[in-house]
Amino acid sequence: MSRLAKMPPIEQDLYACTMCGYCVPVCPAYQEAGWESASPRGRVFAMRQYDLRGPLDRLLRRHVVPGEAFARAAWECTGCGACEEVCPAYIPFDRLWDDVKAWMVESGMGRPALAPYLENVRETRNIYGKPPEERGAWLPPEAVQAETPEGPGSRPRPSRRRPLRSSTGSAARPPTRSSRSPGPSSRSSTRRRSPTGSWVPRSGAAAPRSPGWGTRAT
């Protein structure tokens, strides 16, 4: 086994994980393998153990250094971004797994089966190794490109928020703080808090009436 390279600076993202498990059921690698080690949570746990390694791990013969099994689990990640989409801690998993894969390559644990695809990308800018001129060869002969093709940036995206409208139909401005109705917070103008924590009327304000003990409120 080759010497493990230095771990990339991903500690902040690793310890931001709450181990909630939202990423586990949506991970295609976990759905295929069925092992926790193939899920994003399992990989984060393994890297945490490596970052927290100490002399006790050596005494107990705990293997916390990422090896071939971890490298295989890291390369099983498809980069779909489903874990990043459901993460409540907003961890950038898409970038994190790319850094982890690069870490495995630097440590000599890359995937030899992917080497031909890498060479294709370097030479032809695509994984198939085909020339760019044949990019549209799959289209039928009768297919003709429109003069104004529709795409993500072809038309302005409508806003989801609708402007406020007044009774006359014109756009109304949202109310400012000074124009809003006073509400329950207006009680602070007639009452103050005593040193014991109870509310007492301010000077000049009438005290609220309440039925005494043993009397019935009318």
Image (tube, helix red, strand yellow):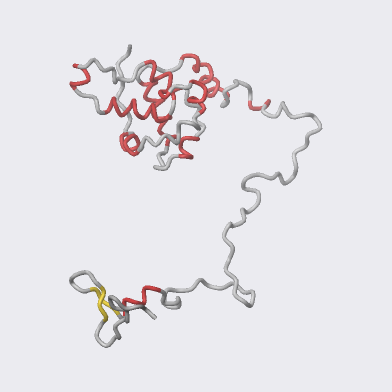
Rendered location of residue 70, percent (x, y): 38, 20
* Residue at the bottom extreme of this rendering: 204
Quadrant, the N terminus: top left
Number of disc labels:
0
Name the quadrant containing residue 48.
top left
* Residue at the right extreme of this rendering: 142
* Residue at the front extreme of this rendering: 214
Q: Residue at x 81, y 32 (%)?
A: 142
Relative placement, left or right, of 165 versus 66 is right
In the displayed structure, 18 sits above or below 50; it is: below
Rendered location of residue 120, percent (x, y): 55, 20
Quadrant, the C terminus: bottom left
Name the quadrant containing residue 92.
top left
- Front residue of 15/203: it is 203
In the displayed structure, 199 sits above or below 78; it is: below
Relative placement, left or right, of 186 versus 150 is left
- Front residue of 205/39: it is 205
Rendered location of residue 155, percent (x, y): 65, 51
- Front residue of 167/198: it is 198
Relative placement, left or right, of 164 versus 194 is right
Relative placement, left or right, of 50 versus 182 is left
- Front residue of 187/127: it is 187
Q: Residue at x 39, y 73 (%)?
A: 184
Rendered location of residue 205, percent (x, y): 29, 85
